[in-house]
Amino acid sequence: MTERILITGAAGGLATLMRPRLARPGRVLRLLDITEPAAPEPDEEVVTASVTDRAAVAEAMRDVSAVIHLGGHSLEGPWENMLDVNMNGTYVVLEAARTAGVRRLVLASSNHAVGFRPREEEVPDYAFPRPDTFYGVSKVTMEALGSLYHDSFGMDIIAVRIGSCFERPKDVRMLAHWLSPDDGARLFETCMSTPSPGFRVVWGVSDNTRRWIALDEARSLGFEPLDDSEVFAAELLAKEGEPDLSRPPHNQVGGSWRIAAADPDGATPRIDRTS
Protein backbone atom coordinates (compact mmCIF):
# COMPACT_ATOMS: atom_id res chain seq x y z
CA MET A 1 0.00 0.00 0.00
CA THR A 2 1.33 3.44 -0.95
CA GLU A 3 2.20 5.77 1.93
CA ARG A 4 1.62 9.44 1.18
CA ILE A 5 3.38 12.17 3.19
CA LEU A 6 2.36 15.80 2.79
CA ILE A 7 5.24 18.27 3.10
CA THR A 8 4.29 21.94 3.31
CA GLY A 9 6.83 24.61 2.45
CA ALA A 10 8.23 22.07 0.01
CA ALA A 11 10.21 24.55 -2.08
CA GLY A 12 12.10 25.87 0.96
CA GLY A 13 15.64 25.09 2.00
CA LEU A 14 14.80 22.56 4.70
CA ALA A 15 12.33 20.64 2.55
CA THR A 16 14.80 20.60 -0.33
CA LEU A 17 17.31 18.90 1.95
CA MET A 18 14.73 16.45 3.28
CA ARG A 19 13.07 15.34 0.03
CA PRO A 20 15.76 12.93 -1.21
CA ARG A 21 16.41 11.71 2.31
CA LEU A 22 12.74 10.91 2.96
CA ALA A 23 12.17 9.17 -0.37
CA ARG A 24 11.30 5.46 0.02
CA PRO A 25 9.93 2.70 -2.19
CA GLY A 26 6.17 2.69 -1.77
CA ARG A 27 6.11 6.26 -0.47
CA VAL A 28 4.80 9.34 -2.26
CA LEU A 29 5.81 12.81 -1.12
CA ARG A 30 3.09 15.38 -1.79
CA LEU A 31 4.81 18.76 -2.03
CA LEU A 32 2.83 21.91 -1.23
CA ASP A 33 4.23 25.40 -1.68
CA ILE A 34 3.38 28.70 -3.37
CA THR A 35 6.43 28.05 -5.58
CA GLU A 36 6.87 24.79 -7.48
CA PRO A 37 9.69 22.75 -5.90
CA ALA A 38 12.72 22.15 -8.08
CA ALA A 39 12.94 18.98 -10.17
CA PRO A 40 10.06 16.91 -8.77
CA GLU A 41 10.64 13.16 -8.93
CA PRO A 42 8.14 10.57 -10.27
CA ASP A 43 7.19 9.66 -6.70
CA GLU A 44 6.47 13.29 -5.80
CA GLU A 45 3.18 15.13 -6.30
CA VAL A 46 3.24 18.93 -6.57
CA VAL A 47 0.50 21.17 -5.17
CA THR A 48 1.04 24.87 -5.88
CA ALA A 49 -0.81 26.68 -3.09
CA SER A 50 -0.36 28.65 0.11
CA VAL A 51 -0.77 27.06 3.52
CA THR A 52 -3.43 29.73 4.10
CA ASP A 53 -5.61 28.43 1.23
CA ARG A 54 -8.16 26.32 3.10
CA ALA A 55 -9.64 24.62 0.05
CA ALA A 56 -6.26 23.74 -1.45
CA VAL A 57 -4.85 22.46 1.83
CA ALA A 58 -7.99 20.39 2.45
CA GLU A 59 -7.63 18.80 -0.99
CA ALA A 60 -3.90 18.20 -0.39
CA MET A 61 -4.78 16.16 2.74
CA ARG A 62 -6.60 13.53 0.65
CA ASP A 63 -5.12 10.03 1.22
CA VAL A 64 -2.33 11.41 3.42
CA SER A 65 -0.97 9.38 6.34
CA ALA A 66 1.26 12.06 7.91
CA VAL A 67 2.15 15.72 7.52
CA ILE A 68 5.51 17.45 7.88
CA HIS A 69 4.60 21.11 8.25
CA LEU A 70 7.54 23.26 7.16
CA GLY A 71 5.50 26.00 5.47
CA GLY A 72 5.76 29.62 6.51
CA HIS A 73 8.22 32.50 6.65
CA SER A 74 11.59 31.27 7.91
CA LEU A 75 13.01 34.69 8.82
CA GLU A 76 11.80 37.58 10.94
CA GLY A 77 9.36 39.96 9.24
CA PRO A 78 6.36 42.20 9.82
CA TRP A 79 3.73 41.06 12.33
CA GLU A 80 1.10 40.80 9.62
CA ASN A 81 3.18 38.22 7.71
CA MET A 82 3.75 36.10 10.80
CA LEU A 83 0.09 36.28 11.75
CA ASP A 84 -1.23 35.36 8.30
CA VAL A 85 1.21 32.74 7.06
CA ASN A 86 2.96 31.27 10.08
CA MET A 87 0.15 31.32 12.64
CA ASN A 88 -3.02 31.16 10.56
CA GLY A 89 -1.28 28.82 8.11
CA THR A 90 -0.54 26.37 10.92
CA TYR A 91 -4.17 26.51 12.01
CA VAL A 92 -5.33 25.84 8.45
CA VAL A 93 -3.02 22.80 8.17
CA LEU A 94 -4.08 21.38 11.54
CA GLU A 95 -7.76 21.89 10.87
CA ALA A 96 -7.51 20.32 7.41
CA ALA A 97 -5.68 17.35 8.91
CA ARG A 98 -8.32 16.94 11.61
CA THR A 99 -11.14 17.08 9.08
CA ALA A 100 -9.39 14.57 6.79
CA GLY A 101 -8.64 12.16 9.64
CA VAL A 102 -4.85 12.59 9.44
CA ARG A 103 -3.57 11.64 12.87
CA ARG A 104 0.18 12.33 12.69
CA LEU A 105 1.82 15.73 12.19
CA VAL A 106 5.36 16.99 12.64
CA LEU A 107 5.61 20.76 13.10
CA ALA A 108 8.81 22.68 12.40
CA SER A 109 9.25 24.90 15.42
CA SER A 110 12.46 26.78 16.15
CA ASN A 111 15.06 27.71 18.72
CA HIS A 112 13.62 31.23 18.41
CA ALA A 113 10.55 30.09 20.35
CA VAL A 114 12.87 30.24 23.37
CA GLY A 115 15.37 32.67 21.89
CA PHE A 116 15.85 34.81 25.01
CA ARG A 117 16.58 31.77 27.19
CA PRO A 118 20.08 32.29 28.65
CA ARG A 119 22.86 29.84 27.92
CA GLU A 120 23.04 27.01 30.41
CA GLU A 121 24.60 23.56 30.61
CA GLU A 122 21.70 21.97 28.75
CA VAL A 123 18.51 23.77 27.70
CA PRO A 124 15.62 21.34 28.32
CA ASP A 125 13.16 20.14 25.71
CA TYR A 126 10.17 21.87 27.29
CA ALA A 127 11.93 25.15 28.05
CA PHE A 128 9.24 27.75 28.70
CA PRO A 129 8.62 30.02 25.68
CA ARG A 130 10.75 33.16 25.56
CA PRO A 131 10.45 34.23 21.91
CA ASP A 132 12.96 36.75 20.59
CA THR A 133 11.05 37.94 17.52
CA PHE A 134 7.62 37.96 15.89
CA TYR A 135 8.91 34.86 14.10
CA GLY A 136 9.59 33.28 17.49
CA VAL A 137 6.09 34.19 18.64
CA SER A 138 4.71 32.41 15.57
CA LYS A 139 6.58 29.25 16.58
CA VAL A 140 5.26 29.47 20.14
CA THR A 141 1.79 29.73 18.61
CA MET A 142 2.53 26.71 16.42
CA GLU A 143 3.44 24.66 19.50
CA ALA A 144 0.33 25.86 21.34
CA LEU A 145 -1.91 24.91 18.43
CA GLY A 146 -0.28 21.49 18.29
CA SER A 147 -0.98 20.99 21.98
CA LEU A 148 -4.57 22.15 21.54
CA TYR A 149 -5.27 19.80 18.64
CA HIS A 150 -3.77 16.85 20.50
CA ASP A 151 -5.73 17.51 23.68
CA SER A 152 -8.96 18.30 21.84
CA PHE A 153 -8.89 15.65 19.12
CA GLY A 154 -6.29 13.06 20.15
CA MET A 155 -3.98 13.76 17.21
CA ASP A 156 -0.31 12.75 17.52
CA ILE A 157 1.70 15.95 17.05
CA ILE A 158 5.41 16.54 17.57
CA ALA A 159 6.87 20.05 17.48
CA VAL A 160 10.57 20.03 16.62
CA ARG A 161 12.53 23.05 17.83
CA ILE A 162 15.10 23.11 15.04
CA GLY A 163 18.41 24.79 15.77
CA SER A 164 19.78 25.20 12.24
CA CYS A 165 19.69 22.66 9.41
CA PHE A 166 22.10 23.21 6.55
CA GLU A 167 24.59 20.99 4.74
CA ARG A 168 27.22 22.40 7.11
CA PRO A 169 27.20 24.96 9.94
CA LYS A 170 27.67 28.51 8.66
CA ASP A 171 29.46 29.96 11.69
CA VAL A 172 30.94 29.08 15.07
CA ARG A 173 27.62 29.62 16.84
CA MET A 174 25.98 26.92 14.73
CA LEU A 175 28.49 24.35 15.98
CA ALA A 176 26.32 24.14 19.10
CA HIS A 177 22.86 23.74 17.57
CA TRP A 178 23.44 22.38 14.04
CA LEU A 179 21.13 19.62 12.82
CA SER A 180 22.72 17.74 9.96
CA PRO A 181 20.38 17.01 7.04
CA ASP A 182 20.87 13.27 7.58
CA ASP A 183 20.02 13.56 11.27
CA GLY A 184 17.10 15.80 10.34
CA ALA A 185 15.68 13.08 8.11
CA ARG A 186 16.28 10.48 10.82
CA LEU A 187 14.43 12.67 13.32
CA PHE A 188 11.47 13.24 11.00
CA GLU A 189 11.25 9.51 10.30
CA THR A 190 11.27 8.84 14.04
CA CYS A 191 8.54 11.44 14.61
CA MET A 192 6.37 9.85 11.93
CA SER A 193 6.83 6.25 13.09
CA THR A 194 7.03 6.20 16.89
CA PRO A 195 3.83 4.67 18.31
CA SER A 196 1.31 7.02 19.96
CA PRO A 197 3.62 9.90 20.94
CA GLY A 198 0.77 12.23 21.89
CA PHE A 199 1.99 15.82 21.92
CA ARG A 200 5.72 16.36 22.30
CA VAL A 201 8.21 19.19 22.03
CA VAL A 202 11.68 17.98 21.07
CA TRP A 203 14.90 19.68 20.10
CA GLY A 204 16.15 19.13 16.57
CA VAL A 205 19.94 19.11 16.88
CA SER A 206 22.73 16.66 16.14
CA ASP A 207 24.87 15.22 18.92
CA ASN A 208 27.42 18.01 18.62
CA THR A 209 30.49 18.15 20.83
CA ARG A 210 29.64 21.79 21.63
CA ARG A 211 25.91 21.11 22.10
CA TRP A 212 24.11 22.75 25.04
CA ILE A 213 20.64 21.71 23.89
CA ALA A 214 18.88 18.64 25.33
CA LEU A 215 18.31 15.48 23.27
CA ASP A 216 16.45 13.55 25.97
CA GLU A 217 12.95 13.84 24.53
CA ALA A 218 14.02 13.11 20.96
CA ARG A 219 15.93 10.06 22.17
CA SER A 220 12.90 8.91 24.15
CA LEU A 221 11.06 8.69 20.82
CA GLY A 222 13.84 6.50 19.40
CA PHE A 223 15.96 9.14 17.64
CA GLU A 224 19.70 8.57 17.71
CA PRO A 225 21.74 11.30 15.99
CA LEU A 226 24.88 10.14 14.20
CA ASP A 227 26.53 13.42 13.22
CA ASP A 228 28.67 15.98 15.04
CA SER A 229 29.43 19.51 13.88
CA GLU A 230 32.93 19.27 15.36
CA VAL A 231 34.24 18.06 11.98
CA PHE A 232 33.74 21.69 10.81
CA ALA A 233 35.07 23.35 13.96
CA ALA A 234 38.72 23.88 13.00
CA GLU A 235 37.82 25.64 9.76
CA LEU A 236 35.24 27.92 11.38
CA LEU A 237 37.39 28.72 14.42
CA ALA A 238 40.28 29.66 12.14
CA LYS A 239 38.00 32.29 10.58
CA GLU A 240 36.22 33.57 13.71
CA GLY A 241 38.35 32.57 16.69
CA GLU A 242 37.13 31.02 19.93
CA PRO A 243 33.80 32.57 20.98
CA ASP A 244 33.16 34.48 24.18
CA LEU A 245 30.28 32.39 25.54
CA SER A 246 29.20 35.14 27.92
CA ARG A 247 28.37 37.60 25.15
CA PRO A 248 25.94 37.72 22.18
CA PRO A 249 25.34 35.81 20.04
CA HIS A 250 26.59 32.89 22.17
CA ASN A 251 24.96 33.66 25.52
CA GLN A 252 21.33 32.92 24.65
CA VAL A 253 19.46 30.34 22.63
CA GLY A 254 18.36 32.60 19.76
CA GLY A 255 21.66 34.33 19.14
CA SER A 256 21.27 37.97 18.14
CA TRP A 257 17.73 37.78 16.81
CA ARG A 258 15.34 40.30 18.34
CA ILE A 259 12.69 42.76 17.27
CA ALA A 260 13.45 46.46 17.02
CA ALA A 261 11.26 49.51 16.49
CA ALA A 262 9.25 49.08 13.31
CA ASP A 263 10.06 51.25 10.30
CA PRO A 264 7.28 53.58 9.11
CA ASP A 265 6.45 51.17 6.30
CA GLY A 266 5.87 48.38 8.82
CA ALA A 267 9.04 46.42 8.14
CA THR A 268 10.84 45.06 11.19
CA PRO A 269 14.64 45.49 11.29
CA ARG A 270 16.66 42.36 12.02
CA ILE A 271 19.99 42.27 13.80
CA ASP A 272 21.07 38.83 12.66
CA ARG A 273 19.51 36.40 10.19
CA THR A 274 22.05 33.58 10.42
CA SER A 275 21.71 32.22 13.96
Image (cartoon, rainbow, N blue to C red):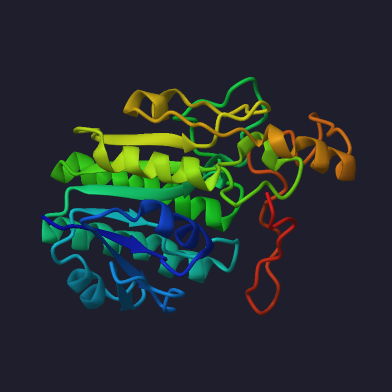
Residue 225 drawn above or below residue 109: above
Q: Quadrant of the N terminus?
A: bottom left
The single residue placed furthest to the front in the displayed view is 25
97 sits to left or right of 188: left
Q: Indicate the position of residue 94 as horizontal and vertical percent values.
A: 25, 57
At x 13% / y 63%, what residue is drawn? 63
Q: Indicate the position of residue 192 as horizontal and vertical percent values.
A: 28, 43
At x 17% / y 44%, what residue is drawn? 152
Q: Give residue 267's quadrant in the image.
A: bottom right
Q: Indicate the position of residue 123 as horizontal and vertical percent values.
A: 56, 26
Q: Indicate the position of residue 13 as horizontal and vertical percent values.
A: 53, 62
Residue 147 drawn above or below residue 224: below
Residue nearest the observer in this picture, 273 or 147: 273
138 sits to left or right of 255: left
Q: Give residue 244's quadrant in the image.
A: top right
- Is residue 147 visible from the viewing direction of this image? no
